[in-house]
Image (tube, rainbow, N blue to C red):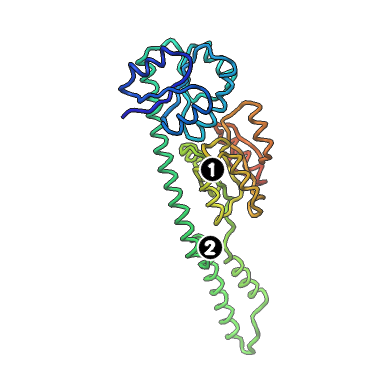
């Protein structure tokens, strides 16, 4: 299998190597960095990766990489940077956090090919896992909708139903005892108030037990979803959504007490999902905590400007996670 790569930049020797020495691994097409030219190639070639071969690029060219990155993110195309350390450092200065992978000289042509193929293989496995998780969650949402429709008038969940039946049996037993006691009395005197109160208390206990707090996790990384669910399942009821669309579908029929929302997701990112949540009166009161892998001060300030209840930096620390949730929900936890 050949990967399709779109190459650009001023390092012509490396670009030539892609066309001459790496044809076994890659189907290659070159493009300029002019935005219109780049976006047309991106649309019609549909590459598996964009590879930028650096050599003494101008500051203006480096600054426009942020615009190129936006187009790449929308199409879920990774950005691979190749060049000398000095050029790569300059690139990072003017276009921070744009590259998904960086290869720094010195290196051989075979090393470039090996590293890019390995990166794209791992990415393909991730995308397959993402797709499987997305399909699984779509099925779960559909099944929940069907189940909710069928059982709308059926009462609470199985555990609550068991508790109700147990309490009802207790109430009926007490009622039988009161009836027998009344029958035994010669004057037909009614049962004592204390006995009646016992029955009432038993009937009240038959109401469904209060559920644990519920948390919805929205993140495009299946591994992150699994890890966070492991952190939380002992203390909370947890649902997961691998993108904003599935999360909003879930919230149409289900309620939650708090949303953990990934800030940077392909397609519809965290801020866009939060905007949709805030736009619905029925959801506006749900607290939202952003999850972000970006530690840059400016980015954090952007996230806080959207007024989430809190935010957490990845990698997520379990104790910090539980502490933040406890604070936001105003509940006491016993995990310490």
Instruction: Give the quarter of the figure containing the C terminus.
Output: top right
Give the residue displayed 49% in from the left and 65% down from the top: 151
The numbered mark at residue 21 is: none
Residue count near mark 1 (Cα–Cα under 10 Å), binned few <14, some 14–19, many ≥20 = many
Q: Nearer the viewer, residue 156 or 100?
A: 100
Instruction: Give the quarter of the figure containing the N terminus.
Output: top left
Q: Secondary structure at mark 1?
A: strand
Q: Position of residue 279 (x, y in %)?
A: 65, 49
Q: Nearer the viewer, residue 204 or 217?
A: 217
Q: On the rendered structure, is 183 left or right of 112?
A: right
**Which residue was labeled with disc 2?**
156
**In the image, residue 109 above or below residue 179:** above
**Residue 320 location, quadrant:** top right
**Which residue was labeled with disc 1?**
218
Q: Secondary structure at mark 2?
A: loop
Q: Are marks 1 and 2 in contact (CB under 8 Å)?
A: no
Give the residue displayed 56% in from the left and 55% down from the top: 252
Task: Please tell me which of labels 1 and 2 falls first in the chain.
Answer: 2
**In the image, residue 302 above or below residue 101:** below
Count of all numbered marks drawn on residues in the image:
2
How far apart marks 1 and 2 lie (CA) works out to: 26 Å
Q: Position of residue 292 (x, y in %)?
A: 58, 33
Q: Position of residue 290 (x, y in %)?
A: 61, 38
């Amino acid at each position: 299998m050949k990967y399709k790569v779109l190459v650009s930049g001023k390092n012509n020797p490396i670009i030539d190597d892609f066309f001459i020495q790496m044809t076994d691994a890659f189907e290659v097409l070159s493009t300029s960095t002019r935005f219109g030219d780049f976006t047309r190639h991106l649309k019609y070639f549909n590459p598996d990766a964009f590879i930028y071969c650096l050599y003494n690029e101008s500051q203006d060219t480096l600054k426009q990489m942020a615009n190129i990155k936006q187009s790449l993110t929308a199409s879920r195309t990774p950005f691979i940077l190749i060049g000398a350390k000095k050029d790569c450092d300059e690139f990072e200065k003017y276009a921070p956090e744009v590259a998904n992978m960086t290869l720094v000289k010195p290196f051989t042509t075979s090393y470039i090919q090996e590293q890019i193929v390995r990166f794209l293989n791992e990415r393909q496995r991730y995308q397959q896992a993402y797709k499987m998780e997305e399909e699984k969650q779509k099925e779960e949402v559909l099944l929940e909708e069907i189940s909710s429709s069928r059982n709308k008038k059926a009462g609470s969940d199985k555990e609550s139903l068991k508790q109700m039946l147990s309490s009802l049996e207790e109430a009926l037993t007490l009622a039988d005892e009161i009836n027998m006691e009344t029958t035994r009395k010669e004057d037909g005197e009614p049962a004592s108030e204390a006995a009646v109160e016992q029955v009432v208390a038993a009937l009240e206990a038959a109401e469904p037990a209060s559920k644990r707090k519920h948390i919805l996790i929205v993140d495009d990384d299946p591994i992150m979803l699994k890890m966070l669910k492991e952190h939380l399942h002992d203390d909370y009821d947890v649902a997961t959504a691998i993108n904003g669309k599935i999360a909003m579908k879930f919230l149409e029929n289900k309620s939650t007490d708090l949303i953990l929302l990934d800030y940077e997701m392909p397609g519809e990112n965290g801020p866009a999902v939060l905007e949709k949540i805030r736009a619905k009166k029925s959801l506006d009161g749900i607290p939202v905590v952003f999850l972000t892998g970006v530690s840059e001060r400016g980015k954090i300030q952007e996230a806080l400007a959207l007024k989430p209840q809190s935010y957490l930096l990845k990698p997520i620390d379990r104790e910090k996670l539980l502490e933040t949730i406890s604070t936001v929900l105003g509940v006491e936890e016993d995990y310490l």
